[in-house]
Amino acid sequence: VNHLLGIKYLNKKDIELIFETADHFKEVINRSIKKVPTLRDTTIANIFFESSTRTKLSFELAEKRLSADVINFSASQSSVKKGETLIDTVNNILSMKVDMVVMRHPNPGAGIFLSKHVKASIINAGDGAHEHPTQALLDSYSIRERLGEVTGKNVVIVGDILHSRVALSNIFALKKQGAQVKVCGPKTLIPKYIESLGVSVETNLKKALEWCDVANMLRVQNERMDISYFPSTREYTQQFGVNKKLLDSLDKQIVIMHPGPINRGVEITSDVADSNQSIILEQVENGVAIRMAVIYLLASKIK
Ligand code: CP
């Protein structure tokens, strides 16, 4: 397979290979060798149809650290605005001898669709409420770094599960590595099919936190929210927000994660987000090594 379209299509060995490759790149970066010549003859296009800070910059940095040539495309400043289709857009970019496309798109399945219609390696950088595979890889990698391994750990994903590509990709990644997974959030934001993925549901946050080793606090995605799904922000924070008092009431120190961007004071308070229980910035740091690994492994298959 020359694409990374979703964690659904990976197995445990694929994930381990990505982590071992990322270990190597992280070690290289930590030795202050910020650039390796590996992909000097590869050109990568980052095409973003939705806003991004972390994913876009992290992919660009990963590509540059591998010495690839990089072009960046933002739909809002492009001829998509004049009505050009996705396939025409990408085929025009590919005609400039581009080898690989990293795409974020608001439509679920956009990367899968593209992979069937163009001749390039596609990396899904988030497709609507479907998957965000590199986020789930960097999340599991960060758990492995903090706790030694992912296998056997209890992980709760808290919040808006229904609209979350981070939740779905994390569920696939964690289950494939042998972690136990719970989701916790308002009933209206938990999809009916979730238990068929081997995940249990808990609507009481304190009980979920007492059970877990790791809590991944999702952002409330107001931009994807139909008002009928959602309790008021104040109710949400009271029932599903994590704060220091709640964490201090547990008889253990759990690891706190968040994919970013954070709604400070809604799903997580600043004293938790910025505490040493939080690995939020480690997640971002690890994202570069994970994306270097994914790009390197895919590029070695297309050359
Ligand atoms: N975690 C994440 O995908 O953040 P961005 O939307 O800023 O890329």
Image (cartoon, rainbow, N blue to C red):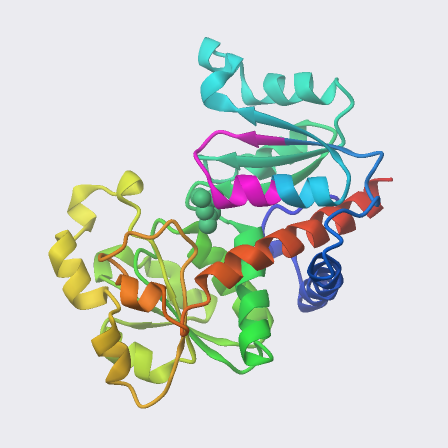
Q: Nearer the viewer, residue 177 or 233?
A: 233
224 or 283: which is nearer to us? 283
Residue shown at 36%/88% (left/top)?
252
- Residue stretch rendered in magenta on the structure: 46-59
Residue 59 in percent (x, y) is at 61, 43
Q: Is residue 57 magenta?
A: yes
Residue 28, visible in the rendered structure: yes
Judge from the rendering whether residue 151 lies leftward or rightward of residue 66; answer left or right.
left
Q: Is residue 293 left or right of residue 211?
A: right
Q: Residue 54: percent from the left, percent from the top?
A: 50, 45
Q: Quadrant of residue 112?
A: top right
| Residue 163: x %, y % from top left | 35, 49
> In which quarter of the view is residue 137 placed?
bottom right
Furthest toward the top, the residue is 82
Q: Is residue 184 magenta?
A: no
Residue occupying image coordinates x 76% and y 36%: 68
Q: What residue lies at 28% left-to-right and 67% top-to-bottom?
A: 271
Indicate left or right for 296 with 147 as reference. right
